[in-house]
Amino acid sequence: MSKICQIYRWMCGFIMATAIAQLLSLLPWSFLIIAVAATIAYTMGQKENSMILQVVATGLIFGWIKCYFAG
């Protein structure tokens, strides 16, 4: 797979994870839900050497922070 395709997949994964985190932030205890999901995704990404899972974990955290602090 070319580098352009990989970067495109990472961008799409980050944007989708951010949107999902913003939706989940409407739930009570949203930080706990997102933190557990991000931890699992990041750990699996580290274990399998998958950059897309690490990007998704970062997107989840970024989306929650954006919604929590910026409104």
Image (spheres, helix red, strand yellow):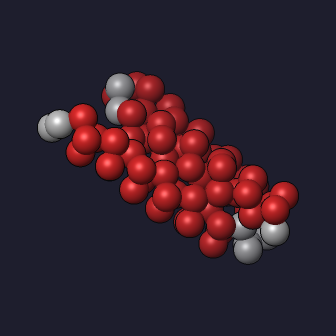
Above or below, 25 against 65 in this view is below
Reply above or below: 47 against 56: above
In the rendered image, the quadrant that contains the N terminus is: top left
Q: Residue at x 40, y 25 (%)?
A: 47
- Pick the residue in front: 50 or 14: 14
Q: In the visual, does 44 lie left or right of 34?
A: left
Q: Where does the image place residue 60, in percent across and percent down from the top left?
A: 59, 52
| Number of numbered discs on residues | 0
Decide if residue 2 is on the left or right side of residue 26.
left
Q: Is residue 55 above or below residue 24?
A: above
Q: Is residue 25 above or below residue 61?
A: below
At 65% from the left and 67% from the top, the residue drawn is 22
Q: Residue furthest front?
A: 4
Residue that protrudes farthest toward the left in the picture: 1
Residue at x 39%, y 56% (from the top left corner): 12
Task: Name the quarter where the C terminus is drawn.
Answer: bottom right
Splitting the image into 4 quarters, where does residue 10 fall? top left
Residue 44 in sight here: no
27 vs 36, left or right, is right
Q: Is residue 35 visible?
A: yes
Q: Position of residue 11 (x, y in %)?
A: 42, 50
Residue 57 location (% of width, % of height): 54, 44
Q: Position of residue 45 (x, y in %)?
A: 42, 33
